[in-house]
Image (cartoon, grey):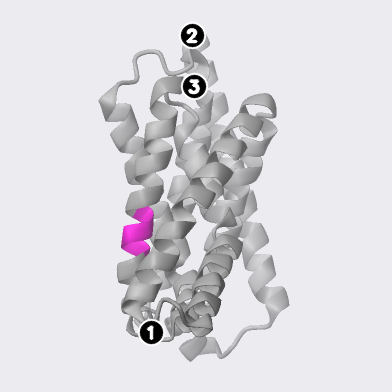
Amino acid sequence: MDLTSPAFWAALGSIIWVNILLSGDNAVVIALAARALPAHQQKKAIFWGSAAAIVMRIVLTIVAARLLQLPFLKIVGALALLYIGVDLLREDDDGDDDGVGKGQGGMLAAIRTILVADLVMSLDNVLAVAAAANGDVPLLVIGLAVSIPLIIFGSTLLLRVMERFPLIVTAGAALLGFLAGEMLMTDPAVVERFGELPHAVINTAGAIGAALVVGIGMLLQRRAAKERTE
């Protein structure tokens, strides 16, 4: 596509805008995963996690249409999100040392969490990005690459807010649970068995997922606190 063409810039703007709108939950999980690291590693984890996630999203977008037709894929993704949400809450309880003792392994674990969560949460988002790109892969790559600094900024801002208001960590984990419930109810295997479910049912499943993540996470936090006092 001609770089001087208005159509090119319109399509590029659409990709960037759609990616920003659909990456709010990704920014949350990036901030959640990086918050327990030492301050000097947080920015590195956010940068490399975001960059790797964007590269993975480009690959996902290219094969998105076929990928989302696979039955049980969203169910597996939903279970992975539930686990990540609970694990992030559990790690929040272990973060009293402000990252002391967490080295390179901790940063790699945070990047791994970012990648897995972004992979799962991007399954639906990539279709909208693919539609905006209209099959133009170079345009897709440019648009998603330009989005990286914006996602990093959002994640860094959320990280600072989480440090001041720890309750946001619980809210972020609940968001992952909610997305997991929604994802499970929209899996092709579920739709084939029960048909297209009403939004009320999907939202209820999301609420149950959120409650499940927060409930299990808080239970594990209390259990860990009790073990420390014994």
* Whether residue 3 is situated above or below residue 99 in the rendered picture: below
Q: Which residue is mark 2?
A: 230
Q: What number is the disc on residue 95?
A: 3
Of helix, strand and loop, which one carries label 2? loop
Residue type of the residue flagged with mark 3 = Gly
Which residue: 55% across, 71% down?
Answer: 13
Of helix, strand and loop, which one carries label 1? helix
Q: Quadrant of residue 218?
A: top right
10 Å crowding of disc 3: few (<14), some (14-19), many (20+):
some
Q: Which residues are magenta?
A: 53-57
Q: Are marks 1 and 2 in contact (CB under 8 Å)?
A: no
Tell me which label, 1 or 3, sits earlier in the chain. 1
Q: Are marks 1 and 3 in contact (CB under 8 Å)?
A: no
**CA–CA distance between discs 1 and 3?**
40 Å
Tell me which label, 1 or 2, sits earlier in the chain. 1
Residue 107 x/y as whole percent: 33, 31
